[in-house]
Image: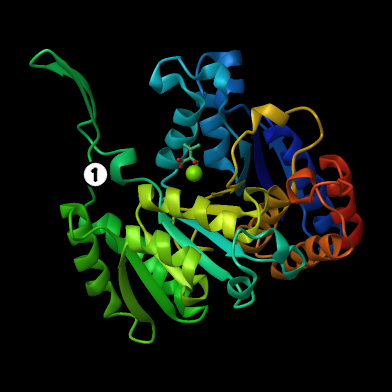
């Protein structure tokens, strides 16, 4: 059956890396027998320019009908001072919210070929790095009401609300425990329960949910300590379960451990994989406007996000493994995009990098 994928290239390097992901998806379909159809739509700054809205109704409608959504990146300095609800990021946040994509999976792995790029000490890198950040994506201070700005006693105030209800916590906890069950069966829930009421509820509900997953070992960690432990001893983590804001921060930190933000994919789902609803697949990096349009971006995060799409949205597990293997092979043969190259090392452009992966897949 034909699978319908909506492409949202977005801004900056988004279109370039999306192009390479599509190249690889087409090749994967050819080699592994998938039938994929693509349709492109506007999001982010590109949509704002064309339609005055970072998430036009038409885009949202297409996404609702899709089997999977692939997004490049959104944002850029050009839109830094337009009203908050028109900013490119607001389009992405609304897309997540409208489609109920509450579960964000961010796997962090270190390719042995790139061990030298990690910001960690070699003896720490040698312990390995293979963890999964499960980030709640449609709640927390990102969406909590009330939020806004007002003048009180002659002073400008601005506020956001860090709020979770128990159902929001329970459903993401289930995703976390379920993922841990399929991995090394260790789940570390990260919060700030020594200070925040929403974190205390978080911890309580995670413990209640744990009763259904006795085979998973549960631990709790404060977010400040977690930020430190990630650089001191990352191998202690298997699955990190956390809220929207902490997950945003910790996943960028974890990416630096893996060598580059240009390597990490993510999937945003509305439930356990395969339980219906289109997932959104994207690299975790941003739009990198400083290098946009120069064929210098690293498409590997986007290509690895395409692998997650093949696995989780289309059920093509072998194809997904094939793509990951092709990426590994490309790196093993010494090809490096600019972000992965050491000073003086020869670099490979975005488009060529995509070709190399597609060739190796074939
Ligand atoms: C991410 C990004 C987004 C977020 C931005 C672009 C709104 O940083 O996906 O991690 O904060 O969630
Ligand atoms: Mg982020």
In the rendered view, tell whether residue 37 sits above or below residue 209.
above
Count of numbered circles on the image: 1
Could you tell me which residue is drawn at 23 percent across and 66 percent down? 203
Could you tell me which residue is drawn at 29 percent across and 41 percent down? 141
In the rendered view, tell whether residue 320 sits above or below residue 5.
below
In the rendered view, tell whether residue 201 sits above or below residue 138.
below
Q: Is residue 32 visible?
A: yes
Q: Nearer the viewer, residue 7 or 274?
A: 7
Neighbourhood count class around disc 1 (C-alpha, 10 Å): few under 14, some 14–19, many 20 upward: many
Report x, y in % for residue 6: 64, 39
Q: Is residue 362 visible?
A: no
Answer with left or right where residue 260 lies relative to residue 319: left
Report x, y in % for residue 186: 42, 79
Could you tell me which residue is drawn at 90 percent across and 63 percent down? 333
Answer with left or right where residue 230 lies relative to residue 164: right
Please identify the quadrant where the C terminus is shown.
Answer: bottom right
Q: Which residue is identified by label 1?
A: 162
- Tell me the quarter of the picture where residue 201 sits: bottom left
- Tell me the quarter of the picture where residue 192 sits: bottom left
Q: Nearer the viewer, residue 307 or 147?
A: 147
Q: Nearer the viewer, residue 218 or 289?
A: 289
Answer with left or right where residue 122 lies relative to residue 299: left
Please identify the quadrant where the N terminus is shown.
Answer: bottom right
Report x, y in % for residue 146: 20, 32
The residue at the far left in this view is 153
Describe the element under mark 1 as helix, strand or loop. loop
Could you tell me which residue is drawn at 47 percent across and 64 percent down? 230
The structure's colour scheme is rainbow
């Amino acid at each position: 059956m034909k699978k319908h994928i909506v492409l949202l290239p977005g801004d900056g390097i988004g279109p370039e890396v999306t192009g390479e992901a599509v190249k690889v998806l087409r090749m994967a379909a050819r080699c592994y027998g998938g039938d994929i159809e693509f349709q492109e739509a506007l999001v982010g700054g590109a949509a704002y320019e064309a339609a005055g809205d970072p998430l036009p109704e038409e885009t949202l409608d297409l996404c609702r009908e899709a089997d999977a959504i692939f997004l490049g990146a959104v944002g850029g300095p050009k839109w830094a001072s337009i009203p908050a609800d028109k900013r490119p990021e607001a389009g992405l946040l609304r897309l997540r919210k409208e489609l109920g994509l509450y579960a964000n999976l961010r796997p962090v792995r270190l390719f042995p070929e790139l061990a030298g790029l990690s910001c960690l000490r070699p003896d720490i890198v040698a312990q390995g790095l293979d963890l999964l950040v499960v980030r709640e994506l449609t709640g927390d201070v990102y969406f909590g009401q009330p939020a806004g700005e007002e003048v009180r006693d002659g002073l400008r105030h601005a506020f956001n609300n860090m709020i979770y209800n128990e159902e929001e916590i329970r459903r993401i906890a289930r995703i976390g425990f379920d993922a841990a069950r399929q991995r090394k069966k260790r789940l570390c829930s990260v919060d700030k329960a020594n200070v925040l009421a929403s974190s205390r509820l978080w911890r309580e509900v995670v413990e209640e949910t744990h009763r259904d997953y006795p085979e998973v070992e549960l631990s709790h960690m404060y977010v400040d300590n977690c930020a430190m432990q990630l650089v001191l001893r990352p191998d202690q983590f298997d699955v990190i379960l956390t809220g929207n804001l902490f997950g945003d921060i910790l996943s960028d930190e974890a990416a630096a451990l893996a060598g580059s933000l240009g390597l990490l994919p993510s999937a945003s789902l509305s439930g356990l994989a395969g339980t219906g609803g289109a997932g959104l697949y994207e690299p975790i990096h941003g739009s990198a406007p400083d290098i946009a349009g120069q064929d210098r971006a690293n498409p590997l995060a986007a290509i690895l996000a395409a692998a997650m799409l093949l696995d989780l949205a289309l059920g093509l597990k072998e194809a997904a493994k094939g793509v990951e293997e092709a990426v590994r092979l490309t790196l093993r043969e010494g090809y490096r995009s600019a972000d992965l190259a050491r000073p003086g090392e020869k670099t490979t452009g975005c488009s060529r990098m995509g070709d190399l992966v597609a060739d190796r897949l074939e």
